Structures are given as structure tokens and as C-alpha cells.
Amino acid sequence: MVTGHGLTRSYLCIFHMIPNSTCPCGLEEEQSIHHTIFNSTQLENERRILRKAVDGTGDTWPTPLEQLTRKHIKTFMKFIKSIDFNAL
């Protein structure tokens, strides 16, 4: 996810490993890295924890992805590790 090579449907679809890239969360959006981090309804609980940690530093949500991968990398890594990509 940090490098843009996450196991999202959009990434897997590029290599024809799955037939479509739509996220099953119900928003009818491509399951890109950005969608997974900021929009997917399937990750609301995990995102709430990430957002609380970012807000606690004085930064605002949504924070740019670049800030998540630099300034908030430890919290962001916990968020990523909490995702069950098989369930997505």
C-alpha cells in the first residue's frame, strides 16, 4: 500500500488475476489504494482509529497520502496490517 503495490482489486485486475476492480463495499467505485484508505465502507472501524491518531497530532483528516506515508507511517502501517485483504 505504501509503495502503490497493495492487494487492491484495481492492482490485481491489471494482472488479470480478477475480472473487475469494483470494490464490494457498495459505493460502486474502483478499489484503488486511495479508495481503500479513504472511502471503502468496509474499513470504517479501522479508518476511525487511523483518523483519531492523525487528528491527535493536530493534522486534519483527510490528510494527504504522502503525509500518511511519512509523518504518520507507524500509525498508517498499523492500519494497513489491520486490513484483511482476503475479506475485501
Image: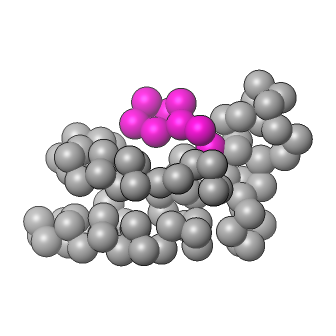
From the viewer's perspective, tell me whether residue 76 is left or right of residue 85: left
- Is 21 covered by the magenta stretch? no
Residue situated furthest right in the rendering: 19
Residue drawn at the location 77% of the way across and 55% of the way down: 22
From the viewer's perspective, tell me whether residue 70 is left or right of residue 22: left
Q: Nearer the viewer, residue 87 or 1?
A: 87
Magenta part of the chain: 1-8
Q: Quick check: can you spot residue 7?
A: yes
Which quadrant holds residue 52? bottom left
Q: Nearer the viewer, residue 43 or 59?
A: 43
Instruction: Give above or below for 41 relative to 66.
Output: below
Instruction: Give above or below for 44 relative to 77.
Output: below
From the viewer's perspective, tell me whether residue 62 is left or right of residue 23: left
- Residue 25 location (% of width, % of height): 68, 68
Residue drawn at the location 77% of the way across and 47% of the way down: 21
Residue drawn at the location 53% of the way across and 30% of the way down: 5
- Residue 55 location (% of width, % of height): 20, 72
Quarter placement of the C terminus: bottom right
Residue drawn at the location 40% of the way across and 68% of the way down: 47
Number of numbered discs overlaid on the protein picture: 0
Which quadrant holds residue 13? top right
- Residue 77 location (% of width, % of height): 30, 45
- Main secondary-structure element of the magenta-colored stretch: loop
Q: Quick check: can you spot residue 65?
A: no
Instruction: Give above or below for 10 relative to 63.
Output: above
The way the protein has been coloured in the rendering is one colour
- Is 7 covered by the magenta stretch? yes
Residue situated furthest top in the rendering: 15
